Image (cartoon, coloured by chain):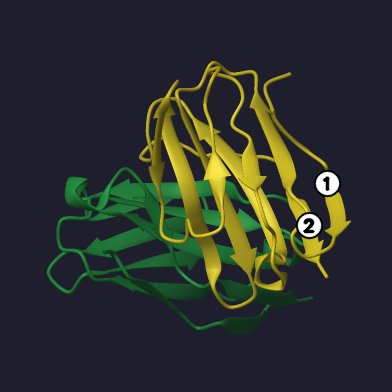
Amino acid sequence: GENVEQHPSTLSVQEGDSAVIKCTYSDSASNYFPWYKQELGKRPQLIIDIRSNVGEKKDQRIAVTLNKTAKHFSLHITETQPEDSAVYFCAASGSNNAGNMLTFGGGTRLMVKP
Amino acid sequence: EAQVTQNPRYLITVTGKKLTVTCSQNMNHEYMSWYRQDPGLGLRQIYYSMNVEVTDKGDVPEGYKVSRKEKRNFPLILESPSPNQTSLYFCASSFRDHTDTQYFGPGTRLTVL
């Protein structure tokens, strides 16, 4: 089945700097790649997603890039703010052979220092 | 208000005592799923359901059962809980399938002694 690896596991940046989180996946047939943000004690919430027919997608300070050849995708947060502090999870959807499910990475704890 | 609810939110139990965690959504979503969250392992899918009476295994189904008798409800059943099932559990639903936005419930923190 699908395997998703996420790096780094923790990331500390100064307010205003950029943050980049990277994920790799194993199933070349995967075609959907969402990113979820989980604040402390809260439920995960979708922040952005990308499908395999697109190489990049932006939403204000957040962007996601996808490299299908290398089987990796990244989350970019610019001008970080303290409220960006959270755990971020990437995920990939397996091919139909793997079922209708999402496989998540291990998470990245982002800390934005004021 | 559109939402996914879970009950109970916190549960401490003992090995072998059957328990059920309920999940309900009011958005008429077809797809529902259960995840467990453990430190460093992210969210791992236990079971999912594409619609009423249609369920399938995720990555870590051992020790769990589910049912989908109604579209809005998707309970998670632990028939004989063990300490390695101590975890934070999330139910989620989406409009049609796993490639739609997943709306998560508030989570259930389960401790099995």
In which quarter of the view is residue B66 placed?
top right
Query: In the rendered view of the protein, which quadrant contains the C terminus of chain B?
Result: bottom right
Residue at horizontal 45 percent and vertical 20 percent from the top: B52
| Residue B109, image x, y percentages | 78, 57
Question: Is residue A80 in view?
Answer: no
Q: Which mark is residue B109?
A: 2
Q: CA distance from mark 2 to mark 1?
A: 6 Å
Q: How many marks?
A: 2
Q: Kindly indicate whether the residue at mark 1 contacts the one at mark 2 (C-beta within 8 angstroms).
A: yes
Amino acid marked by disc 1: Arg
Residue at horizontal 64 percent and vertical 49 percent from the top: B90
Query: In the rendered view of the protein, which quadrant contains the N terminus of chain B?
Result: top right
Of all chains in the rendering, the one displayed in yellow is B
Q: Chain of mark 2?
A: B
Whether labels 2 and 1 belong to a single chain: the reply is yes
Label 2 SS = strand
Residue at horizontal 66 percent and vertical 57 percent from the top: A38
A69 shown above or below B19: below
